[in-house]
Image: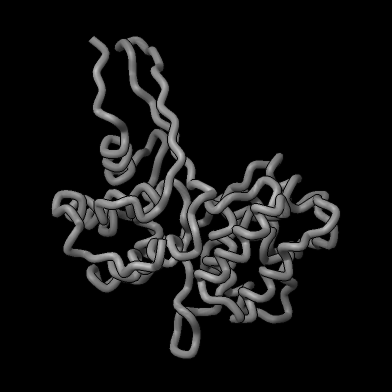
Amino acid sequence: MTWQQPQLATVPEENLREFERSISAKHDPNELGGKPIRNFSLGIRGIEIPCQFSDRLSREAIHALARNSAVDTLFVCVCIMAWGGMHQSHRNKFFLQEKNTWIEVAEEIRDGKHTRQTAYESFAELQRGKKLPGVGPAYFTKLIYFLMPDDTPGYQPIGYIMDQWAGCSINLLFNTDIVLMDSTFTWKSNRKGLKHAASFIVSNQNTGARYESFCSAIDVLKKHFGVTGHQIDRALLSTGGRQMAAWRNHVILQRNPKQNCD
């Protein structure tokens, strides 16, 4: 696939209106996220956590760390993965491997030496070489999102977080498979009978060109709605669990196959 500019004209009006409500909802892109830094970082070599970083961090705080050249890149990456709520077993595979070859790519991204497409391709190549244990696109795009320099004149446009919710949302909004998703469908029983349940993850078959199209789609949306890319990113993720937001529920209903069990 070559890079293609997503077209807003292809967006179904119903989905666009529903997503606009998600932007208007109280989804603060700067809310605290993930896990407390100190607990998450225990046992990682070369990491010393100052007292002020013992708790959870906001996006703004992590971006500030990434912009501070006095802060070690490994520490910034630990904060990013803690913010993202990385599972402990994946944390161990990723940070406790004998040689963290990925840190070189992270430093290049932070120094502004990559576009978002080449950053994605560099991490994907490491993943194919089994040098990103426990980390797929949903997590290494978090590194790209926070490590790239500010999206201002003189810098490349920043990359965004391409996890399952953002990927499924963009595909739904633009009515095409911009992001390749691996999916499994199972029947589950409950008190009301049988339910068709679905599970989606971002496929490892996505390329840097697909990631560029995904990020470009977010740029199209932020221009259309007159908001920041961070606000679009947060609205795409929406909210799940017991407090599930309308957009998240909309995505779940639309992406699941319409099947009945009579």
Above or below — where is 212 with respect to 84? below
Residue 225 position within the rendered picture, expressed as x and y whole percent measured from the top left: 24, 68
Residue 195 position within the rendered picture, expressed as x and y whole percent measured from the top left: 33, 19
Above or below — where is 75 with respect to 164? below
Q: Going by the image, does 14 lie left or right of 138?
A: left
Q: Going by the image, does 222 lie left or right of 206?
A: left
* Quarter of the view holding residue 148: bottom right
Q: Residue furthest front?
A: 1
Of 257 and 13, the residue lying toward us: 257
Q: Residue furthest left?
A: 13
Q: Going by the image, does 73 lie left or right of 212?
A: right
Residue at x 54%, y 60% (from the top left corner): 141
Which corner quadrant holds the C terminus?
Answer: top left
Q: How is the image coloured?
A: one colour
Q: Going by the image, does 178 lie left or right of 109?
A: left
Of 57 and 218, the residue lying toward us: 218
Residue at x 33%, y 13% (from the top left corner): 194
Residue at x 28%, y 49% (from the top left corner): 172
* Quarter of the view holding residue 124: bottom right
Residue at x 41%, y 61% (from the top left corner): 1
Of 184 and 221, the residue lying toward us: 184
- Total marks placed: 0
Residue 99 position within the rendered picture, expressed as x and y whole percent measured from the top left: 83, 58
* Quarter of the view holding residue 221: bottom left
